[in-house]
Structure formats: C-alpha cells, structure tokens
Image (tube, rainbow, N blue to C red):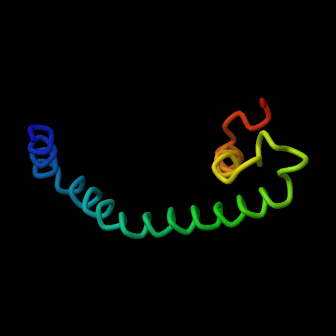
Amino acid sequence: LVLVLRTVQIVQRFPKLGKIVFGLVGTIKSIGNVVLLLLLVMYFFAIAGVQAFHQNDPFHFGNLQRAMLTLFQLATLDSWGDA
C-alpha cells in the first residue's frame, strides 16, 4: 500500500510521467491479447511438433508440455542448443 502511495506521489509531482504511466496502464489489454495469441500459436505448433517429432526427439517433443517448453526456449533463445 505504501508503494502505491509513493507511486501516486511521484506521478503527481511529475505530470509527464503520469501521462506515460497512464498510457502503459491503458495498453495492458492489448498486451494481454498479443500474449494470448502467441500462446495459441505456440500451442498449435507444439501439437504439430509432438505429432511430427516425438519418435525422433522424445526429449524435446515427447509430450505437449515439453514441446511447449522447447518452443518457448526457441522463441526466447534461452539455451535452446545446449540440450
């Protein structure tokens, strides 16, 4: 609660910062839609990956959860070549 009050005080002290904060808060719904769309696309590709590669690469595409993790690692470039 104290952190929220401090944030409000800072926004009141700097009006241009308030415009930026309100702009960011206003885009939360759009960002949520983009994240949902990305998860849906990754889900479809994970299903396709499990169907296509579960025999050849069961470690990465053995089940849907592991395939989603593999696709997330590929999308974020998070040590996808190490395993």
Image point 70% across, 45% down: which residue?
Answer: 70
Image point 78% across, 39% down: which residue?
Answer: 59
Q: Decide: is 40 above or below 7.
A: below
Q: Decide: is 23 above or below 72.
A: below
Q: Nearer the viewer, residue 34 or 47?
A: 47
Q: Residue furthest top?
A: 82
Q: Position of residue 78 (x, y in %)?
A: 66, 37
Q: Nearer the viewer, residue 1 or 45?
A: 45
Residue 46 is drawn in which quadrant?
bottom right
Q: Nearer the viewer, residue 6 or 45?
A: 45
Quarter of the figure with the C terminus = top right
Image point 67% across, 54% down: which residue?
Answer: 64
Left or right: 66 in relation to 27? right
Q: Position of residue 2 (x, y in %)?
A: 9, 38
Left or right: 37 in relation to 11? right
Quarter of the figure with the N terminus = top left
Image point 9% across, 44% down: which residue?
Answer: 5
Q: Nearer the viewer, residue 50 or 11?
A: 50
Total number of numbered discs in the rendering: 0
Residue 29 is drawn in which quadrant?
bottom left
Q: Position of residue 69 (x, y in %)?
A: 64, 46
